Amino acid sequence: TGDTPLIGLPGRIGESLEEQGSHPGPLSFYALTPTYRVLGGSAWALQVGAALVHIVAITVALALARRRGGPAVFASVAVALAVLIAGFGSGALTEPWNPYLPLLWWVVVLLGVWSVLDDDLAVLPVVVLAGSFCAQTHVPYLSLSVGLGVAAAAWVVRAAVTAPSDSSDRARATRSLALAGLLGVLLWLPPTVDEFTQEPGNYTKLVDHFTTPPDGEEPIGFAAGADEALARLDLWHLGSHALTDPALLTNTSLERSPSAGRGGVVLLLWVVSAVVAAMPVHRERRLLALHAMVGGALVLGAVSITRIFGLTWYYLMLWMWAVAALLAMSVVWTLWRVVARTRTAPLPIRPLAIGLAAVAALVTAHTTAADAVGAEQSDAEISAVLTALVPETLAALDAGVGPATGRAGRYHVTWRDSFHIGSQAFGLVNELDRAGFDVGMAPLFHVPATDQRVIDSPDSTAQLVVVNGVFVDQYRARGDAVEVAFSDPRDRAAVERFDALRADLLGTLEARGLSDLQAAVDDNLFAVAIDPRLPEAIRRQADEMLAIGAPTAVFLLPPGAPG
């Protein structure tokens, strides 16, 4: 459309909302759009679009696995995918959130680089496509995709240079480079146009943010970074727990945390297996290429993790689990080669492939399918409240309640949110826009709301304020506020639990001398839940309170009235 995005989703990039940066590019929007449009442009259609993005990635990954060898390689990759999908969970893989959308496309990048290093040069354009999708969608993949992509391209250049000038090998390498280069230019054209048409462009914002971190935020450094990286090589956590607890890798449960110690043992096993695989007696080109890819991904990944600043959110490192899965494959394959060398007769491949295929099917049926039956969207409780608020709000606007003038009006949406940093207000904007209303937010939020949905309060017909928690009674006491919708998701037991948690949390904060956070318990609980000064167990109390929820209402105010 005329408002086609040129950059990615807004992120925690930059120091001000006015100049908030975004993730590098819009490929995730483009990938979601066809399914979203065909299925009616609803929130559900967007979730189906996300699922389809992952299904395509699975298909491409298995096609690459098939190119790398026979049924055993194909089935091994299928097992790796099945375990990863079980660990990520159906909820994550149907949520159109930018940290989740690249999860399986990153597997495609890894398999594609392996293919190129195994001299399957025609796969380089696939690496460019998958790597660009990952890098544009979520910025942690940028350095990883660029690093591995450059290595793959350099390998193809080497092949082109060393091949005889009139050989088919040189022609094949040249075609692959040309197609990959053309594809890269086309895929990165939108954000490049943004860079040269905006002041400042998003590239500039990204460079400024990552070269000069915000005040008070320093990279976590080598020690903490190594610990985080090793924890995501914990194959016991990836395998056994992911098979018994769907979505474990996207769940921050304290009881089921990965171990850096176990990850260290896995890394040592991989180093030994890589050395063994390089010995002339065991050397096999495909296996050496796999080890080389894993090694490159480990180095790039470890460096990337040490450069994280601010909170080390779990979703910043989800990509490392895919590296761990293929690392496990390289170790097992090496062991297979060693055992095969000790036998006079070759080991039977077909039974191995059948067994691996059975494992992949069992994991999919036992964990993923069972998880999918009851899958819910993220923050289902918040969405349920909005589901209750939207019909009443639409009816009030159509009926011309208070200052509303139906669909002829222009509506400014804002919030007083003690729980969810305004997320339900953005949801309300989405739903009003879908219903055909002219709706927007303040210029301060022009990046997340988009420039096309900026309506300042004085320029509106009426204001809609999404209010929750302690603010509900405050707005009910205002003479200029008309309540048009209300929802309270809590029963008596939930209210009692919330009150008990609140009293305990307030006492803990007072005992720790954190009186500045006591007021936030009532007016910005989310800030308490992420405050790094608090131990994890205490932040969990705030998380539970957030999950319980709060009474929420929508009020109409005259234009220009204080929101």
Image: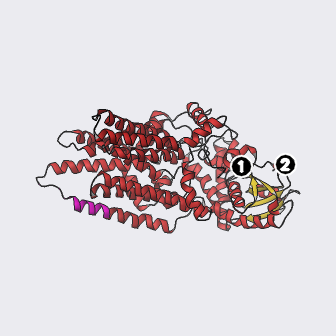
Secondary structure category for the residue under label 2: helix
Quarter of the image for residue 465 reads bottom right
Tell me: residue 127, above or below residue 394. Answer: above
Q: Residue furthest front?
A: 166
Give the magenta-colored segment's residue range.
344-357
Q: Is residue 543 left or right of residue 260?
A: right
Q: Colour mode? A: secondary structure
Q: Is residue 339 left or right of residue 381?
A: left
Q: Residue furthest right?
A: 479
Quarter of the image for residue 439 reads bottom right
Q: Residue furthest top?
A: 212
Q: Is residue 349 magenta?
A: yes
Q: Is residue 280 visible?
A: yes
Residue toward you, 358 or 234: 358
Residue 441 location (% of width, % of height): 74, 50
Residue toward you, 279 or 447: 447
Q: Is residue 153 left or right of residue 31?
A: left
Mark 1 or 2, closer to the camera: 1
Give the residue displayed 28% in from the left and 58% down from the top.
Answer: 71
Q: Residues within 10 Å of mark 1 (few under 14, many from 20)?
A: few
Q: Is residue 67 magenta?
A: no
Label disc, if present, on residue 452 of the rendered structure? 1
Which residue is identified by label 2?
Answer: 458
Residue 245 location (% of width, % of height): 44, 60
Q: Is residue 233 visible?
A: no
Dot 1 or dot 2, earlier in sequence: 1
Residue 93 location (% of width, % of height): 50, 58
Q: CA distance from mark 1 to mark 2?
A: 17 Å
* Amino acid type at image mark 1: Gln
* Amino acid type at image mark 2: Pro
Secondary structure category for the residue under label 1: helix
Examine the residues drawn in magenta and state their main secondary structure: helix
